[in-house]
């Protein structure tokens, strides 16, 4: 059993009910993103992939918070990483207009940053691993604002929301003595909204491009 979160007090399957159930936020976000993409007439393969990964994040995280095993942990982390990389590539190509080579360089830089912070993964309850994702989101948010694209402040708002959700993830174990439920479930709820905002910031600007 992998015991990482405040709510888990034993090896039982239902030892993290709130952490497991709050992953419904990702499925709601996937459904809302599907509705948005249809409304904006952007029901394309790459958008479908991001929405599928959004749902996979919710399902994988629910499995991990239920079974707490190594295979369940992989089901949790792999969709998260794939979503980050795919979003970076798709936004870079379809909104910014980078070439394939430039987008590939951006992905390599993202992975290099991830490897760089891996040695500090024990800090901040493991939340430091998300620092490269936050920096990428902040850069994309600044770009969207400076270029006066549709929803110009949306990704900047998303980066702020990401900081808040990371804070709840970070304090989960520290707050355990005073609040046995912990705060990891808030990480799930806020990140469902976060992923929807990311998808919206992408989709409306793909539709906006001539």
Image (spheres, rainbow, N blue to C red):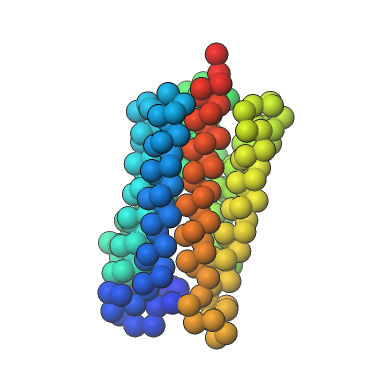
> On screen, 136 above or below 147?
below
Tell me where residue 144 appears, x and y as whole percent: 65, 31
Quarter of the rendering occupied by the N terminus: bottom left
Depth check, front residue: 65 or 24: 24
Q: Residue at x 57, y 59 (%)?
A: 165
What is the count of numbered marks? 0
Residue 125 can be seen, yes or no = no
Q: Position of residue 175 (x, y in %)?
A: 57, 79
The quadrant in which residue 124 appears is: bottom right
Quadrant where the image shows the C terminus:
top right
Q: Residue at x 62, y 28 (%)?
A: 150
- Along the viewing direction, whichever of 144 and 124 lies nearer the viewer: 144
> Which residue is rendered at x = 51% and y = 24% of the image?
206
Q: Is residue 200 rendered to the left or right of residue 35?
A: right
Residue farthest to the top, as pictured: 210
In this view, the residue farthest toward the bottom is 177
Residue 182 seen from this side:
yes
Give x and y (percent) for residue 89: 48, 32
> Whole-percent x and y of residue 105?
52, 32
Q: Is residue 58 left or right of residue 206?
A: left
Q: Is residue 132 above or below residue 40?
A: below
Q: Image quarter for residue 34?
A: top left
**152 relative to 32, above or below:** above
Q: Residue at x 34, y 83 (%)?
A: 10
């Amino acid at each position: 059993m992998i015991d990482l979160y405040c709510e888990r007090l034993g090896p039982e399957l239902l030892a993290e009910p709130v952490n497991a159930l709050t992953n419904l936020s990702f499925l709601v976000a996937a459904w809302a993103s599907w509705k948005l993409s249809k409304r904006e007439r952007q029901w394309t393969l790459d958008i479908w992939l991001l929405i599928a990964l959004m749902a996979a994040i919710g399902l994988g995280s629910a499995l991990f918070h239920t079974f707490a095993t190594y295979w369940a942990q992989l089901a949790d982390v792999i969709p998260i990483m794939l979503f980050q990389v795919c979003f970076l590539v798709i936004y870079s190509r379809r909104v910014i207009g980078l070439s394939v080579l430039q987008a590939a360089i951006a992905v390599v830089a993202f992975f290099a940053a991830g490897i760089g912070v891996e040695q500090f993964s024990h800090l901040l309850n493991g939340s430091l691993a998300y620092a490269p994702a936050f920096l990428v989101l902040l850069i994309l948010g600044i770009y969207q604002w400076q270029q006066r694209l549709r929803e110009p402040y949306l990704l900047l708002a998303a980066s702020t929301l990401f900081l808040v959700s990371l804070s709840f993830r970070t304090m989960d174990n520290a707050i355990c003595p005073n609040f046995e439920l912990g705060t990891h479930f808030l990480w799930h709820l806020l990140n469902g909204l976060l992923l929807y905002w990311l998808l919206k910031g992408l989709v409306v600007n793909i539709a906006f491009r001539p």
